[in-house]
């Protein structure tokens, strides 16, 4: 059996005709930039997340950069970022002109906590970017009370968690401005690059709209130095279709994750970790990724590959050990938990449209690796 790690064809299969109709609509619309599709998507996405405003942008990285800039964060400012995250979270801070300051996770989850944040706050710290990694919401105490206690601007990196909730409230609605990615593998995937920012602040909303399009509040008037990072009409048209199916897609992700949880529950090898452990009550993960941890990660991944199961590692090198961030002066050992995660995490295939048999087969291969009977 061959189990692909991700399949855009399977994920988009049920929307195939609607997506083709959307393409046709845009083709004949005579409005290819910032038209009716973008506006409709922004309204629908703000409603979905539960914020007053949404600004569609080119991708998740730009969503983070613009959010930071709109909040007035720049040179001389420090921004707290998780040590265990995708490089975009750190790079956005640098692109905004500020300095990323890493904070380690609290084992066994991927949460920031009081201790890790308190240890790195300085007089220059202006903001924090909690990342709802793998689709699991960060603790509410961190993104609300703790940030408030340290007087930090909160910008959520919701790239991996669109649809996740904390006591019924969607992630991406807690911070002052929040970044979303519609990269094709994310829970709300476009057919290319796209992103958005959600906010309840009218002034930020106006600034963000200027920042995404040449600093212009209207045509031929340029009030600030802006970017060109608009959301395409075409991607917005696709996203209008995909957004309608998001809750169904996320329910499917949770159903497939539950199969993994059940079939992997009795693996009690020391250091083996399954996302079923340490789930918070009233927190709902959308399983952008189904990530296990194993001290035998590389051997396990190799075994799975031999059985036809593709896996990935998110992420094998933490940002603080990447060459791009060497100038910050971090070294191996600075974030021991994040470094341990980098050595042990393994993402298993999980996406809407993936047949149940592939999940069962993958789980059974892992059971077999650990000498357990197939189920
Ligand atoms: C995907 C992702 C981003 C960036 O999104 P792009 O659309 O790829 O630019 C940012 N942060 C995290 C945690 C991500 O997973």
Image (tube, rainbow, N blue to C red):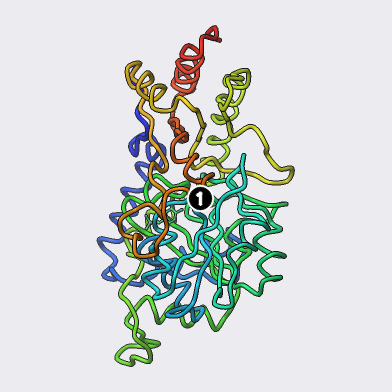
Q: Residue 134 placed where, x, y %?
A: 51, 44
Label 1 residue near ligand 1, CB within 8 Å: no
**For residue 23, side relative to residue 314 (left or right):** left
Determine the image quadrant of residue 151.
Answer: bottom right
| SS class, disc 1 | loop
> Which quadrant is the N terminus positioned in?
top left
Determine the image quadrant of residue 237.
Answer: bottom left
Near-viewer residue (327 or 267)? 327
**For residue 306, side relative to residue 337 (left or right):** left
Q: Residue at x 69, y 71 (%)?
A: 148
Determine the image quadrant of residue 36.
Answer: bottom left
From the viewer's perspective, is residue 258 above or below residue 180?
above
From the viewer's perspective, is residue 362 above or below residue 89?
above
* Picture mark count: 1
Near-viewer residue (240 or 360)? 360
Q: Residue at x 42, y 42 (%)?
A: 314
Near-viewer residue (194 or 367)? 367
> Which quadrant is the C terminus positioned in?
top right
Residue farthest to the top, as pictured: 373
Q: Residue 286 placed where, x, y %?
A: 56, 43
Q: Residue 225 placed where, x, y %?
A: 34, 85
Q: Residue at x 69, y 64 (%)?
A: 146
How crowded pointer 1 is (Cα within 10 Å; few <14, some 14-19, many 20+) is rated as many
Ligand 1 shows up in the quarter that is: bottom left
From the viewer's perspective, is residue 23 above or below residue 55?
above
Residue for badge 1 = 335
Q: Residue 193 placed where, x, y %?
A: 33, 56
């Amino acid at each position: 059996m061959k189990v692909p790690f991700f399949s855009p064809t399977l994920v988009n299969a049920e929307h195939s005709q609607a997506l083709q109709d959307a393409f046709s609509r845009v083709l004949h619309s005579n409005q290819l930039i910032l038209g009716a599709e973008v506006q409709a998507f922004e309204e629908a996405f703000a409603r979905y997340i539960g914020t007053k405003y949404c600004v569609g942008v080119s991708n998740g990285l730009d969503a983070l950069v613009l959010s930071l800039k709109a909040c007035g964060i720049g040179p001389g400012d420090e921004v707290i970022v998780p040590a265990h995250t995708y490089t975009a979270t750190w790079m956005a801070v640098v692109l905004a002109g500020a300095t990323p300051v890493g904070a380690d996770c609290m084992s066994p989850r991927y949460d920031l906590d009081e201790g890790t944040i308190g240890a790195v706050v300085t007089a220059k710290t202006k903001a924090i970017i909690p990342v709802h990694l793998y689709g699991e919401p960060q603790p509410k105490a961190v993104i609300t009370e703790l940030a408030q206690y340290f007087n930090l601007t909160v910008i959520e990196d919701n790239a991996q968690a669109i649809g996740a909730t904390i006591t019924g409230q969607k992630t991406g609605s807690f911070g002052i401005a929040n970044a979303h990615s519609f990269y094709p593998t994310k829970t709300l995937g476009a057919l290319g690059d796209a992103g958005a920012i959600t906010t309840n602040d009218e002034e930020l909303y106006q600034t963000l709209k200027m920042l995404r399009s040449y600093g212009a509040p209207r045509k031929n008037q340029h009030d600030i130095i802006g970017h060109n990072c608009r959301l395409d009409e075409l991607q917005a048209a696709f996203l209008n279709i995909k957004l309608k199916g998001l809750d169904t897609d996320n329910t499917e992700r949770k159903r497939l994750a539950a199969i993994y949880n059940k079939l992997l529950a009795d693996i009690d090898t020391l250091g083996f970790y399954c996302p079923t452990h340490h789930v918070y009550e009233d927190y709902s993960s959308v399983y952008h990724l189904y990530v296990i941890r194993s001290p035998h990660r590389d051997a396990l991944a190799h075994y799975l590959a031999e059985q036809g199961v593709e896996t990935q590692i998110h992420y094998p090198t933490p940002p603080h050990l990447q060459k791009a961030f060497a100038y910050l002066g971090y070294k191996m050992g600075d974030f021991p938990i994040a470094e341990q995660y980098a050595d042990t995490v393994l993402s298993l295939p999980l996406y809407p449209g993936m047949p149940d048999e592939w999940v069962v087969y993958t789980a059974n291969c892992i059971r077999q690796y650990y000498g357990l009977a197939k189920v």
